[in-house]
Image (cartoon, coloured by chain):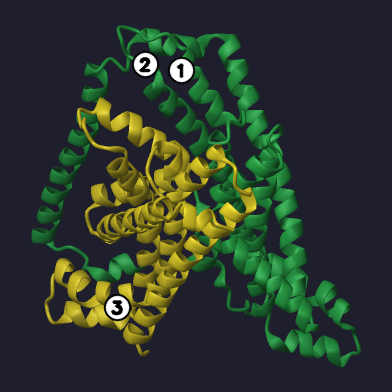
Chain colours: A yellow, B green
Amino acid sequence: MNVLSDNFAMFREGFLGTVELTALSAALALVLGTLIAAFRVSPVPALRIFGTAWVTLLRNTPLVLLFLAVTLGLPALGLKGWDSFWLAVMALGCYTSAFICEAIRSGINTVPVGQAEAARSIGMTFNQTLGQIVLPQAARTAIPPIGSLMIALAKNTAIASGFNVTELGSVQKTLNAASGYDIYVIFLWIAVCYIIITFTISGLFRLLENRLAVAR
Amino acid sequence: MTSSVLYDVPGPRAKVRNRVYGVLSTVAILGLIAFIGYKLDSTGQFQAGLWDDYEYADTQQRILDGLLTTLKTFAIAAVLSVVLGTVLAAGRLSDHKPVRWAATTVVEFFRAMPLLIMIFLLYAAVFTSEPMWALVIGLTLYNGSVQAEIFRSGINAVPRGQSEAAYAIGLRKTQVMTGVLVPQAVRSMLPSIISQLVVTLKDTSLGFIILYEELLFVGKAFAQQTPPVNGVYAFIPMVIVFGSIYILLCLALSSVATWVERRTQRSRKGSPPAMPANDPTITGAPGGQTA
């Protein structure tokens, strides 16, 4: 049982790596996802098509393949010198943004029509209606699905271990290779780490949900 | 149609403005695509030598083999996960507290674990020489737990009156379940069940990391073996070709879900139960949605 105490530094690095990767990819995914959702409901057809294509492509690509595409593709596009951590953030953020977009879009569908009508009747433009009336309400109703997407994101970070990023998955890999320890005990501690992370996220989102729920 | 509510039917000025925005955004998007194409071309990704291999029957055979391996893994995992999902859902709806408690623990644990971590454990601890079973069992445990939640919410969404009526005419719990609740639940949840199968299909690519010879592994091995042309390796052509295959596979499966959804809606008589089918908390989990 002394896997954890013997390798505490490695576990700490892995834990922090996973948290950092999750937080940064989540930020990227939220920003991109909201933007793409706005594209998808905009009056400009070109933007709508772009949004649809983005969501369709990313939702149907396996994340591992997307990791490969980002790791190999960005250097070819002339963006050299990114380390594997930021490439992983790109891959995870873009992938999750497609799902966030859909969550926000279904949130937009729950905003009563009257809200948008009222906004239009006092002369607000599309940008004002969306930005000040519809999106804030949509985001609040989209909190529960976004929460489960964030948990999925935290779990997906494990894939980054296949691409040389230090996080919990790579701890498992290294310790398995170094061996000497019981594989199941290693797994148990890594499982505990992930459970801490996912419980924190779901607690956080439950808090947000209670604070921000829209009374309708 | 929310989109039409968000903005008025455009008048003459708005039409002009929308057209200007349309042209600008089209130019920007096409510019981005052209830039990517130009960059890929100038780094030599489109050189004939890198693509020639895909014309050989030998190569096509290898891709086909990888595809079949992926489909086989997916088929086994899909069947097993639906079976496991049924069992776990039955457990969670049981009248016996210990059974309910055990099923809940199993479901919650496997939903909280990253799939890759589980596959890795299975690979390292049990199936070192047979990575396929590590992958299949990992996929089954994870997706089975998710399917269980889909079944359960489907059964809970059937109006209460249905089961009350069934109990009232003297059916037993098993009869109520199999004769009344499950058929309706499966029908309303079929789109979600299929969406989860798309996730299962995408996740078979995790086999790549434990060196199982599925489609993505074949792709990478292939790109590594292709001799570089003018110093350029064949990785990006590989990503383009294999990415398209995956996207087409998943789209085909998703379109089955859309088709089923439309069909069941059309044939439904009376008012449907409140369906959580579009609830992304159930369907959406990316990849475990992992991947």
- Circle 2 sits in a helix, a strand or a loop, which is it? loop
How many other residues sit within 10 Å of disc 1, few (<14), some (14-19) or many (≥20)?
some
2 and 1 marks in contact (CB < 8 Å): yes
Residue bearing mark 1: B224
Q: Are marks 2 and 3 on the same chain?
A: no
Pointer 2 chain: B
Residue bearing mark 2: B233
* Residue B93, label in figure: none
Q: Amino acid at mark 3?
A: Gln
Residue bearing mark 3: A137
Q: Amino acid at mark 1?
A: Gln
Task: Tell me which residue sits at (38%, 86%) in the image.
Answer: A210
Q: Residue B46, image x and y in percent?
A: 32, 16
The answer to whether A201 appears left or right of A175 in the picture is left
Q: Are marks 2 and 1 on the same chain?
A: yes
2 and 3 marks in contact (CB < 8 Å): no
Q: Is residue B286 visible?
A: no
Q: Quadrant of residue B48?
A: top left
Q: Amino acid at mark 2?
A: Tyr
Pointer 1 chain: B
Label 2 and label 3: CA atoms lie apart by: 49 Å
Q: Residue A178, image x and y in percent?
A: 53, 38
Label 1 and label 3: CA atoms lie apart by: 50 Å
Sequence order check, earlier mark of 2 and 1: 1
